[in-house]
Image (cartoon, helix red, strand yellow):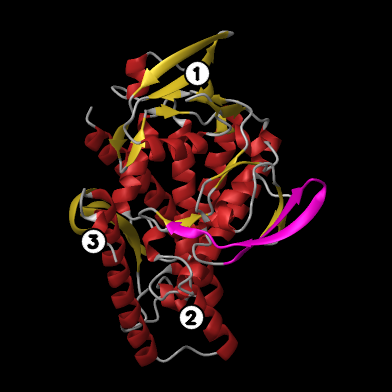
Protein backbone atom coordinates (compact mmCIF):
# COMPACT_ATOMS: atom_id res chain seq x y z
CA UNK A 1 0.00 0.00 0.00
CA UNK A 2 1.38 3.44 -0.95
CA UNK A 3 2.31 5.95 1.76
CA UNK A 4 -0.36 8.36 0.45
CA UNK A 5 -3.12 5.75 0.63
CA UNK A 6 -2.02 4.67 4.12
CA UNK A 7 -2.07 8.30 5.29
CA UNK A 8 -5.48 8.91 3.71
CA UNK A 9 -7.07 5.84 5.31
CA UNK A 10 -5.46 6.59 8.68
CA UNK A 11 -6.54 10.24 8.83
CA UNK A 12 -10.10 9.45 7.69
CA UNK A 13 -10.35 6.74 10.36
CA UNK A 14 -8.86 8.91 13.13
CA UNK A 15 -10.78 12.12 12.38
CA UNK A 16 -13.98 10.25 11.57
CA UNK A 17 -13.87 8.37 14.87
CA UNK A 18 -13.17 11.53 16.90
CA UNK A 19 -15.95 13.47 15.17
CA UNK A 20 -18.33 10.56 15.77
CA UNK A 21 -17.44 10.54 19.48
CA UNK A 22 -17.76 14.34 19.72
CA UNK A 23 -21.16 14.50 18.05
CA UNK A 24 -22.39 11.47 19.97
CA UNK A 25 -21.79 13.45 23.17
CA UNK A 26 -24.11 16.23 21.97
CA UNK A 27 -26.62 13.70 20.64
CA UNK A 28 -26.78 11.49 23.75
CA UNK A 29 -27.25 14.38 26.20
CA UNK A 30 -29.81 16.08 23.94
CA UNK A 31 -31.83 12.85 23.70
CA UNK A 32 -31.52 12.30 27.46
CA UNK A 33 -32.87 15.80 28.18
CA UNK A 34 -35.77 15.43 25.74
CA UNK A 35 -34.53 17.63 22.85
CA UNK A 36 -35.63 16.52 19.38
CA UNK A 37 -32.58 15.62 17.25
CA UNK A 38 -33.38 16.01 13.54
CA UNK A 39 -30.00 15.00 12.07
CA UNK A 40 -26.87 13.16 13.25
CA UNK A 41 -24.36 13.77 10.47
CA UNK A 42 -20.76 12.94 9.65
CA UNK A 43 -19.49 15.45 7.10
CA UNK A 44 -21.23 18.40 5.46
CA UNK A 45 -23.07 19.03 2.22
CA UNK A 46 -25.23 16.60 0.27
CA UNK A 47 -26.48 13.42 1.96
CA UNK A 48 -24.79 10.30 0.54
CA UNK A 49 -26.11 7.44 2.65
CA UNK A 50 -27.97 6.97 5.90
CA UNK A 51 -31.20 5.88 7.55
CA UNK A 52 -34.01 7.38 9.57
CA UNK A 53 -35.07 6.14 12.98
CA UNK A 54 -37.71 8.01 14.91
CA UNK A 55 -37.19 11.78 14.61
CA UNK A 56 -33.55 11.47 13.59
CA UNK A 57 -31.88 11.16 10.17
CA UNK A 58 -28.53 9.39 10.65
CA UNK A 59 -26.42 10.32 7.62
CA UNK A 60 -22.99 10.52 6.01
CA UNK A 61 -22.55 13.62 3.85
CA UNK A 62 -20.41 14.34 0.79
CA UNK A 63 -17.76 16.57 2.40
CA UNK A 64 -15.96 14.49 5.08
CA UNK A 65 -14.69 17.44 7.12
CA UNK A 66 -16.34 17.53 10.51
CA UNK A 67 -19.88 16.68 11.45
CA UNK A 68 -22.88 18.00 13.34
CA UNK A 69 -26.01 17.25 15.34
CA UNK A 70 -29.03 19.30 14.24
CA UNK A 71 -31.59 19.86 16.98
CA UNK A 72 -35.04 21.36 16.57
CA UNK A 73 -35.07 25.09 17.25
CA UNK A 74 -31.35 25.33 18.02
CA UNK A 75 -30.74 28.41 15.83
CA UNK A 76 -31.47 31.43 18.03
CA UNK A 77 -32.24 33.48 14.88
CA UNK A 78 -35.09 31.16 13.86
CA UNK A 79 -38.68 31.84 14.85
CA UNK A 80 -39.47 30.13 18.14
CA UNK A 81 -42.53 28.07 19.00
CA UNK A 82 -43.82 26.70 22.30
CA UNK A 83 -42.75 23.12 21.45
CA UNK A 84 -41.08 21.77 24.65
CA UNK A 85 -38.77 19.54 22.57
CA UNK A 86 -37.06 22.49 20.86
CA UNK A 87 -33.51 23.30 22.01
CA UNK A 88 -34.15 26.99 22.78
CA UNK A 89 -37.16 26.12 24.94
CA UNK A 90 -34.98 24.19 27.36
CA UNK A 91 -33.28 25.83 30.34
CA UNK A 92 -29.85 27.37 30.05
CA UNK A 93 -28.56 24.59 32.29
CA UNK A 94 -29.80 21.95 29.81
CA UNK A 95 -28.27 23.83 26.87
CA UNK A 96 -24.99 24.13 28.74
CA UNK A 97 -24.89 20.37 29.34
CA UNK A 98 -25.59 19.66 25.67
CA UNK A 99 -22.90 22.11 24.51
CA UNK A 100 -20.18 20.83 26.84
CA UNK A 101 -20.92 17.15 26.17
CA UNK A 102 -19.05 17.03 22.83
CA UNK A 103 -15.70 18.39 24.06
CA UNK A 104 -16.05 16.32 27.23
CA UNK A 105 -16.33 13.14 25.15
CA UNK A 106 -13.14 14.06 23.26
CA UNK A 107 -11.24 14.65 26.50
CA UNK A 108 -12.55 11.37 27.97
CA UNK A 109 -11.52 9.57 24.77
CA UNK A 110 -7.96 10.95 25.14
CA UNK A 111 -7.83 9.71 28.75
CA UNK A 112 -9.14 6.24 27.83
CA UNK A 113 -6.78 5.83 24.85
CA UNK A 114 -3.67 6.87 26.78
CA UNK A 115 -4.64 4.61 29.69
CA UNK A 116 -4.87 1.70 27.24
CA UNK A 117 -1.50 2.56 25.68
CA UNK A 118 0.20 2.69 29.09
CA UNK A 119 -1.28 -0.70 29.99
CA UNK A 120 -0.23 -2.38 26.72
CA UNK A 121 2.91 -0.81 25.22
CA UNK A 122 4.20 2.52 26.53
CA UNK A 123 7.27 3.50 24.48
CA UNK A 124 9.23 6.67 25.18
CA UNK A 125 12.77 8.12 24.79
CA UNK A 126 15.15 6.69 27.39
CA UNK A 127 16.55 10.15 28.22
CA UNK A 128 13.16 11.09 29.73
CA UNK A 129 14.09 8.89 32.71
CA UNK A 130 17.43 10.69 33.20
CA UNK A 131 18.08 13.93 35.03
CA UNK A 132 18.54 16.69 32.41
CA UNK A 133 22.32 16.89 32.14
CA UNK A 134 23.66 18.66 29.06
CA UNK A 135 25.85 16.40 26.95
CA UNK A 136 26.55 18.79 24.10
CA UNK A 137 26.20 22.50 23.28
CA UNK A 138 26.22 23.31 19.58
CA UNK A 139 28.42 26.18 18.41
CA UNK A 140 26.92 29.63 17.78
CA UNK A 141 23.55 28.65 19.27
CA UNK A 142 21.63 30.54 21.98
CA UNK A 143 22.79 28.03 24.62
CA UNK A 144 26.44 28.51 23.62
CA UNK A 145 26.10 32.29 23.65
CA UNK A 146 24.41 32.17 27.08
CA UNK A 147 27.37 30.22 28.50
CA UNK A 148 25.88 26.75 28.98
CA UNK A 149 28.47 23.99 29.17
CA UNK A 150 28.68 20.21 28.82
CA UNK A 151 27.92 18.67 32.23
CA UNK A 152 25.53 21.40 33.39
CA UNK A 153 22.47 19.94 35.11
CA UNK A 154 19.21 21.82 34.50
CA UNK A 155 17.48 22.15 37.89
CA UNK A 156 14.76 24.61 36.88
CA UNK A 157 13.29 26.10 33.70
CA UNK A 158 10.60 28.79 33.39
CA UNK A 159 9.30 28.10 36.91
CA UNK A 160 9.39 24.28 36.66
CA UNK A 161 11.59 22.80 39.41
CA UNK A 162 13.62 19.64 38.74
CA UNK A 163 12.25 19.21 35.21
CA UNK A 164 12.57 16.16 33.01
CA UNK A 165 14.12 16.36 29.55
CA UNK A 166 10.58 16.20 28.15
CA UNK A 167 9.61 19.33 30.09
CA UNK A 168 12.84 21.08 29.05
CA UNK A 169 12.17 20.29 25.38
CA UNK A 170 8.58 21.56 25.58
CA UNK A 171 9.56 24.78 27.33
CA UNK A 172 12.21 25.67 24.76
CA UNK A 173 9.88 24.72 21.89
CA UNK A 174 7.19 27.12 23.16
CA UNK A 175 9.61 30.04 23.67
CA UNK A 176 11.06 31.07 20.27
CA UNK A 177 12.56 34.53 20.57
CA UNK A 178 11.48 34.77 24.23
CA UNK A 179 13.78 34.93 27.28
CA UNK A 180 13.75 31.64 29.16
CA UNK A 181 14.95 31.54 32.78
CA UNK A 182 17.07 28.44 33.44
CA UNK A 183 18.72 27.31 36.69
CA UNK A 184 21.71 24.99 36.38
CA UNK A 185 23.96 23.13 38.76
CA UNK A 186 27.68 23.30 37.91
CA UNK A 187 30.45 22.02 40.17
CA UNK A 188 28.12 22.09 43.19
CA UNK A 189 27.01 25.69 42.54
CA UNK A 190 23.57 26.87 41.38
CA UNK A 191 23.75 29.39 38.54
CA UNK A 192 20.85 31.37 37.05
CA UNK A 193 20.96 31.92 33.30
CA UNK A 194 18.74 33.37 30.60
CA UNK A 195 18.58 31.85 27.13
CA UNK A 196 16.54 33.06 24.15
CA UNK A 197 15.72 30.05 21.92
CA UNK A 198 15.78 30.83 18.22
CA UNK A 199 12.89 29.99 15.90
CA UNK A 200 13.82 26.94 13.85
CA UNK A 201 12.34 24.82 11.09
CA UNK A 202 9.09 25.08 9.18
CA UNK A 203 7.09 25.25 12.43
CA UNK A 204 9.31 28.04 13.85
CA UNK A 205 9.54 26.35 17.25
CA UNK A 206 12.17 27.31 19.81
CA UNK A 207 15.67 25.78 19.70
CA UNK A 208 18.27 26.48 22.39
CA UNK A 209 21.14 24.36 21.06
CA UNK A 210 21.77 21.89 23.87
CA UNK A 211 21.46 18.10 23.74
CA UNK A 212 21.05 15.45 26.48
CA UNK A 213 24.02 13.56 27.84
CA UNK A 214 24.07 10.01 26.49
CA UNK A 215 26.05 7.21 28.11
CA UNK A 216 26.60 5.69 24.69
CA UNK A 217 25.50 6.77 21.22
CA UNK A 218 23.99 3.55 19.92
CA UNK A 219 22.68 3.04 16.40
CA UNK A 220 18.99 2.17 16.72
CA UNK A 221 17.90 2.63 13.12
CA UNK A 222 19.58 2.50 9.70
CA UNK A 223 18.04 4.20 6.68
CA UNK A 224 18.05 2.27 3.43
CA UNK A 225 20.56 3.22 0.70
CA UNK A 226 22.34 5.71 2.97
CA UNK A 227 26.12 5.77 3.66
CA UNK A 228 25.91 4.03 7.05
CA UNK A 229 24.03 1.02 5.68
CA UNK A 230 26.23 0.80 2.59
CA UNK A 231 29.40 0.88 4.73
CA UNK A 232 28.25 -2.11 6.80
CA UNK A 233 27.21 -0.49 10.07
CA UNK A 234 24.53 -2.39 11.99
CA UNK A 235 21.81 -1.65 14.51
CA UNK A 236 23.21 -2.02 18.02
CA UNK A 237 26.67 -0.67 17.11
CA UNK A 238 27.93 1.76 19.78
CA UNK A 239 29.66 4.77 18.24
CA UNK A 240 32.93 5.48 20.06
CA UNK A 241 34.65 8.04 17.85
CA UNK A 242 34.33 10.12 14.68
CA UNK A 243 37.68 10.79 13.01
CA UNK A 244 39.34 9.75 16.25
CA UNK A 245 37.35 12.14 18.47
CA UNK A 246 34.86 10.90 21.11
CA UNK A 247 31.13 11.23 20.34
CA UNK A 248 29.29 12.35 23.51
CA UNK A 249 25.96 12.91 21.74
CA UNK A 250 24.40 12.58 18.29
CA UNK A 251 24.26 16.39 18.13
CA UNK A 252 28.07 16.50 18.17
CA UNK A 253 28.13 14.24 15.08
CA UNK A 254 25.62 16.48 13.31
CA UNK A 255 27.83 19.49 14.03
CA UNK A 256 30.96 17.70 12.81
CA UNK A 257 29.27 16.67 9.55
CA UNK A 258 28.39 20.29 8.84
CA UNK A 259 32.12 21.01 8.96
CA UNK A 260 33.39 18.00 6.99
CA UNK A 261 30.43 18.12 4.56
CA UNK A 262 30.83 15.42 1.89
CA UNK A 263 34.41 14.50 2.78
CA UNK A 264 34.94 10.86 3.87
CA UNK A 265 34.80 10.29 7.63
CA UNK A 266 35.95 7.42 9.87
CA UNK A 267 33.61 5.95 12.48
CA UNK A 268 34.87 3.72 15.26
CA UNK A 269 32.18 1.51 16.79
CA UNK A 270 31.92 -1.22 19.39
CA UNK A 271 30.15 -4.37 18.17
CA UNK A 272 29.76 -7.33 20.52
CA UNK A 273 32.82 -6.26 22.50
CA UNK A 274 35.01 -5.75 19.41
CA UNK A 275 36.08 -2.40 17.99
CA UNK A 276 35.52 -1.87 14.28
CA UNK A 277 36.34 1.04 11.99
CA UNK A 278 34.31 2.14 8.94
CA UNK A 279 34.87 4.81 6.33
CA UNK A 280 31.80 6.57 4.92
CA UNK A 281 31.05 9.58 2.75
CA UNK A 282 28.15 11.76 4.03
CA UNK A 283 25.49 12.89 1.53
CA UNK A 284 23.45 16.09 1.39
CA UNK A 285 19.87 15.22 2.34
CA UNK A 286 17.07 17.45 3.67
CA UNK A 287 19.41 20.47 3.60
CA UNK A 288 22.12 18.91 5.79
CA UNK A 289 24.86 16.31 5.53
CA UNK A 290 23.79 12.92 6.83
CA UNK A 291 24.94 9.32 7.02
CA UNK A 292 21.51 7.80 7.67
CA UNK A 293 21.40 6.64 11.30
CA UNK A 294 19.00 7.04 14.20
CA UNK A 295 20.34 6.82 17.75
CA UNK A 296 17.48 7.75 20.08
CA UNK A 297 17.17 4.86 22.51
CA UNK A 298 13.62 4.00 23.53
CA UNK A 299 12.20 2.28 26.59
CA UNK A 300 9.03 0.22 26.80
CA UNK A 301 6.86 -0.16 29.89
CA UNK A 302 3.50 -1.69 30.77
CA UNK A 303 1.61 -0.28 33.76
CA UNK A 304 -1.23 -1.76 35.84
CA UNK A 305 -4.66 -0.14 35.35
CA UNK A 306 -4.55 2.26 38.32
CA UNK A 307 -1.04 3.49 37.54
CA UNK A 308 -1.90 3.76 33.82
CA UNK A 309 -5.06 5.79 34.56
CA UNK A 310 -3.22 8.11 36.94
CA UNK A 311 -0.46 8.68 34.40
CA UNK A 312 -3.01 9.28 31.64
CA UNK A 313 -4.82 11.86 33.79
CA UNK A 314 -1.51 13.57 34.60
CA UNK A 315 -0.28 13.60 30.99
CA UNK A 316 -3.59 14.87 29.60
CA UNK A 317 -3.68 17.61 32.21
CA UNK A 318 -0.13 18.67 31.36
CA UNK A 319 -0.79 18.51 27.63
CA UNK A 320 -4.00 20.48 28.04
CA UNK A 321 -2.16 23.24 29.88
CA UNK A 322 0.49 23.27 27.14
CA UNK A 323 -2.21 23.68 24.48
CA UNK A 324 -3.64 26.65 26.37
CA UNK A 325 -0.14 28.11 26.78
CA UNK A 326 0.41 27.71 23.03
CA UNK A 327 -2.89 29.50 22.27
CA UNK A 328 -1.98 32.29 24.70
CA UNK A 329 1.47 32.79 23.16
CA UNK A 330 0.05 32.80 19.63
CA UNK A 331 -2.48 35.45 20.69
CA UNK A 332 0.41 37.47 22.15
CA UNK A 333 2.38 36.88 18.90
CA UNK A 334 5.18 35.25 20.88
CA UNK A 335 5.04 32.08 18.79
CA UNK A 336 4.41 31.67 15.08
CA UNK A 337 1.05 30.55 13.68
CA UNK A 338 3.10 28.10 11.62
CA UNK A 339 3.22 25.81 14.65
CA UNK A 340 -0.44 24.88 14.05
CA UNK A 341 -0.92 21.66 12.12
CA UNK A 342 -3.87 21.26 9.75
CA UNK A 343 -5.55 18.28 8.06
CA UNK A 344 -2.69 17.65 5.61
CA UNK A 345 0.00 17.47 8.29
CA UNK A 346 -2.31 15.48 10.56
CA UNK A 347 -2.76 13.04 7.67
CA UNK A 348 1.01 12.69 7.31
CA UNK A 349 1.41 12.09 11.04
CA UNK A 350 -1.42 9.54 11.03
CA UNK A 351 0.18 7.71 8.09
CA UNK A 352 3.56 7.58 9.84
CA UNK A 353 1.93 6.28 13.04
CA UNK A 354 -0.03 3.65 11.07
CA UNK A 355 3.16 2.42 9.39
CA UNK A 356 4.97 1.94 12.70
CA UNK A 357 4.97 -1.46 14.35
CA UNK A 358 1.90 -2.15 16.48
CA UNK A 359 -1.26 -0.10 16.93
CA UNK A 360 -0.30 1.91 20.01
CA UNK A 361 1.50 4.72 18.06
CA UNK A 362 -1.75 5.47 16.20
CA UNK A 363 -3.67 5.36 19.49
CA UNK A 364 -1.25 7.86 21.05
CA UNK A 365 -1.68 10.21 18.10
CA UNK A 366 -5.47 9.82 18.22
CA UNK A 367 -5.43 10.67 21.94
CA UNK A 368 -3.37 13.81 21.28
CA UNK A 369 -5.63 15.00 18.44
CA UNK A 370 -8.77 14.22 20.46
CA UNK A 371 -7.49 16.30 23.38
CA UNK A 372 -6.67 19.17 21.01
CA UNK A 373 -10.13 18.94 19.43
CA UNK A 374 -11.85 18.94 22.81
CA UNK A 375 -9.94 21.96 24.12
CA UNK A 376 -10.21 23.88 20.82
CA UNK A 377 -14.00 23.46 20.89
CA UNK A 378 -14.06 24.88 24.42
CA UNK A 379 -12.39 28.14 23.36
CA UNK A 380 -14.84 31.05 23.77
CA UNK A 381 -15.33 31.52 20.02
CA UNK A 382 -18.95 31.89 18.83
CA UNK A 383 -20.15 29.00 16.63
CA UNK A 384 -17.88 26.63 18.61
CA UNK A 385 -19.20 24.92 21.73
CA UNK A 386 -17.15 27.27 23.90
CA UNK A 387 -18.91 30.26 22.31
CA UNK A 388 -22.32 28.76 23.07
CA UNK A 389 -21.23 28.18 26.67
CA UNK A 390 -19.92 31.76 26.94
CA UNK A 391 -23.24 33.21 25.72
CA UNK A 392 -25.14 31.01 28.18
CA UNK A 393 -22.95 32.17 31.09
CA UNK A 394 -23.39 35.84 30.11
CA UNK A 395 -27.15 35.41 29.78
CA UNK A 396 -27.24 33.65 33.15
CA UNK A 397 -25.51 36.58 34.80
CA UNK A 398 -27.75 39.09 32.98
CA UNK A 399 -30.87 36.99 33.71
CA UNK A 400 -32.11 37.68 30.17
CA UNK A 401 -31.28 36.68 26.60
CA UNK A 402 -28.75 38.62 24.55
CA UNK A 403 -30.28 40.62 21.70
CA UNK A 404 -30.77 38.67 18.46
CA UNK A 405 -29.11 41.48 16.49
CA UNK A 406 -25.99 41.28 18.65
CA UNK A 407 -25.87 37.48 18.39
CA UNK A 408 -26.27 37.61 14.61
CA UNK A 409 -23.41 40.09 14.18
CA UNK A 410 -21.15 38.11 16.52
CA UNK A 411 -21.89 34.82 14.73
CA UNK A 412 -21.18 36.42 11.34
CA UNK A 413 -17.83 37.79 12.56
CA UNK A 414 -16.95 34.43 14.13
CA UNK A 415 -17.80 32.58 10.91
CA UNK A 416 -15.49 34.86 8.89
CA UNK A 417 -12.74 34.39 11.49
CA UNK A 418 -13.00 30.59 11.39
CA UNK A 419 -12.99 30.53 7.57
CA UNK A 420 -9.87 32.72 7.48
CA UNK A 421 -8.28 30.58 10.19
CA UNK A 422 -8.97 27.40 8.21
CA UNK A 423 -7.53 28.95 5.03
CA UNK A 424 -4.37 29.99 6.92
CA UNK A 425 -3.91 26.53 8.44
CA UNK A 426 -4.31 24.76 5.08
CA UNK A 427 -1.99 27.29 3.42
CA UNK A 428 0.67 26.59 6.07
CA UNK A 429 0.20 22.84 5.56
CA UNK A 430 0.73 23.20 1.81
CA UNK A 431 3.82 25.35 2.30
CA UNK A 432 5.31 22.74 4.65
CA UNK A 433 4.38 19.77 2.47
CA UNK A 434 5.00 20.72 -1.16
CA UNK A 435 8.75 20.78 -2.01
CA UNK A 436 10.06 24.26 -2.80
CA UNK A 437 7.09 26.15 -1.43
CA UNK A 438 8.35 26.22 2.17
CA UNK A 439 10.92 28.88 1.30
CA UNK A 440 8.06 31.22 0.38
CA UNK A 441 6.67 31.28 3.91
CA UNK A 442 7.04 34.79 5.36
Q: List the residue tagged with mark 3.
A: 440
Which circle's residue, 1 or 3, is located before the other in the chain?
A: 1
Is residue 29 something one can see in this rendering? no
Alpha-carbon span between mark 1 and mark 3: 41 Å
Residue 92 lies, with reference to residue 142, above or below; the image says: below
The kind of secondary structure element at disc 1 is strand
Residue 252 placement (x, y as % from top left): 51, 37
Residue 268's label in the rendered image is 1
Residue farthest to the right, as pictured = 188
Q: Residues within 10 Å of mark 2 (few under 14, many from 20)?
A: some
Mark 1 is surrounded, within 10 Å at the Cα level, by few (under 14), some (14 to 19) or many (20 or more) other residues, namely many
Is residue 332 shown above or below 70? Answer: below
Quarter of the image that includes the C terminus: bottom left
- Residue 181 magenta-drawn? yes
Q: Residue at x 55, y 40 (%)?
A: 114
Q: Nearer the viewer, residue 132 or 312?
A: 132
Q: Quadrant of residue 73?
A: bottom left
Q: Secondary structure at mark 2?
A: helix
**On the image, which quarter does residue 356 sit in?**
top left
The residues colored magenta run 179-199
Helix, strand or loop under label 3? helix
Q: Which mark is residue 391?
A: 2
Amino acid sequence: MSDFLTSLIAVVAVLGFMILIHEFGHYAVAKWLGVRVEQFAIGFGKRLIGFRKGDTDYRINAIPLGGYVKMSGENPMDERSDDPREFMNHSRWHRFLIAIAGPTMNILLAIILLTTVYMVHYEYPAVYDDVPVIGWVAKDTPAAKAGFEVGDRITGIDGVENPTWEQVDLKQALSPGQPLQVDIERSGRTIEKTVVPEAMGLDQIGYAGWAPKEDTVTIIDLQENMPAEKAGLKEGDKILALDGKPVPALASMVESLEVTKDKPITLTVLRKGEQKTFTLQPVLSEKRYRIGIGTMQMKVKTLPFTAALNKSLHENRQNGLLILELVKKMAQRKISMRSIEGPIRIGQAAGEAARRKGWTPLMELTAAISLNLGIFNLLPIPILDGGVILFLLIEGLMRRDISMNIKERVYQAAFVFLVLFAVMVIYNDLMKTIPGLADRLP
